[in-house]
Amino acid sequence: MYQHYARPGPEDSDESTGHAVAILTVARDSRSVQVLDVNTDYQRLWGGTREEWLGATPNVVEQEAANEQILARLRGALNTNIERNFEGIGGREVSRQRDGSCRHIEWRITAMGACQHDAITLVLTQRDVTDQVENEAQLKQLATTDMLTGLVNRSQFDTTLRNELSRQDRYARPLSLIMLDIDYFKDINDRYGHDVGDQVLVEMADLLKGNLRQVDYCARWGGEEFMLLAPETSLEHAVLLADKMRCVINTADFPTSGPITASFGVVEARPQESVKSIMKRVDDALYLAKEKGRDQVSPIELVKSMRFA
């Protein structure tokens, strides 16, 4: 019989779990999987007492159907390897709790000696890695998100743009890029202070997120500049989208600074175009909008022709 053990010392009262261990037995004829023994961490992870688990079906995840699928996978692996060395199976599963929360469980099942008396003894080890997964997600968010506005940051947008340009080359679908710059933003900072300037950037980000399509990507490029990436969008439709956003900004309420306008540069990606090339073109288009008086979308001629068509 497996020697039942608990973690010593004051950790005994801790609700967290270390490595949960269950000793299992699998009969060769029925392939039923039963618990021979469990350690204290297994009880902490799944609840119940040691006595209640003896002879029961082990828990790998909370959901019954998903748990049975894993045990079926185990039985299949044993059928294939029972006469040879069973190298074990494992994975990381999302275990949904009855209260709606989720736990991430890392697990592995290995053999504990050779098959004896028409049965094989196995060891199930498990670890709750929810904190680790959540920390990794937070670190990823910090690495890909602009902390002031909550938008995608420049580095992540650059990666997204590269991926979308590659997809455009593969499938020959239109892809447009829009760069916008808040007009006279330096005057806002000089007049009201940088705290107000930051608040304007946050309000602008919320405005963009609330008025773009679900397929569009929005990022803070730096300072008062923002990027909009519009997949499956031709230049003509991208100009319409940019002009719509220009009008939304013109009519929006910015309580900390008063009315605001923005200038827009718009380009459509060319076949096999590099990130450097399209970024240079959209920056030039934005510069043209600024030169023509701000609060405009470049190419201006295209906007005018569509308005009067």
Image (tube, rainbow, N blue to C red):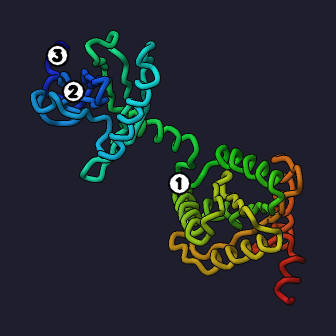
Sequence-earlier tag: 3 or 2: 3
* Viewer-nearest of discs 3 and 2: 2
Distance from the alpha carbon under mark 1 to that under mark 3: 47 Å
Say which label, 1 or 2, has the lower sequence index: 2
Asked if marks 1 and 3 touch (Cβ < 8 Å), the reply is: no
Residue 113 % position (x, y): 33, 10
Name the residue at 19% across, 32% down: 44
Query: Label 1 is placed on what type of residue?
Result: Gly
Is residue 192 at least partly visible in the picture? no
Three-letter residue code for mark 2: Val
Residue 215 numbered mark, or none: none
Q: Quadrant of residue 235?
A: bottom right
Label count reads: 3
Give amino acid for label 3. Answer: Tyr
Which numbered dot is residue 35? 2
Who is closer to the viewer here, 78 or 101? 78
Farthest-out residue, bottom: 308
The quadrant the C terminus occupies is bottom right
Residue nearest the viewer, comparing 257 with 164:
164
Q: Quadrant of residue 268?
A: bottom right
What mark, if any, has residue 150 been given in the picture? 1
Residue 57 image position (x, y, % from top left): 23, 34
Q: How far apart are the two marked residues, 3 and 2, measured between alpha carbons?
A: 15 Å
Mark 3 burial class by Cα count in 10 Å: few <14, some 14-19, many 20+: few
Q: Are marks 3 and 2 in contact (CB under 8 Å)?
A: no
Q: Name the quadrant of the N terminus.
A: top left
Vertical relation: 285 (above or below) 3: below
Instruction: Find disc 3 in the rendering and name its residue.
Output: 5
As drawn, 178 above or below 236: above
Tell me the crowding category of disc 2: few under 14, some 14 to 19, or many 20 or more residues within 10 angstroms, Cα based. many
Circles 1, 2 touching at the beta carbon (< 8 Å): no
Q: Earlier in the sequence, mark 1 or mark 3?
A: 3
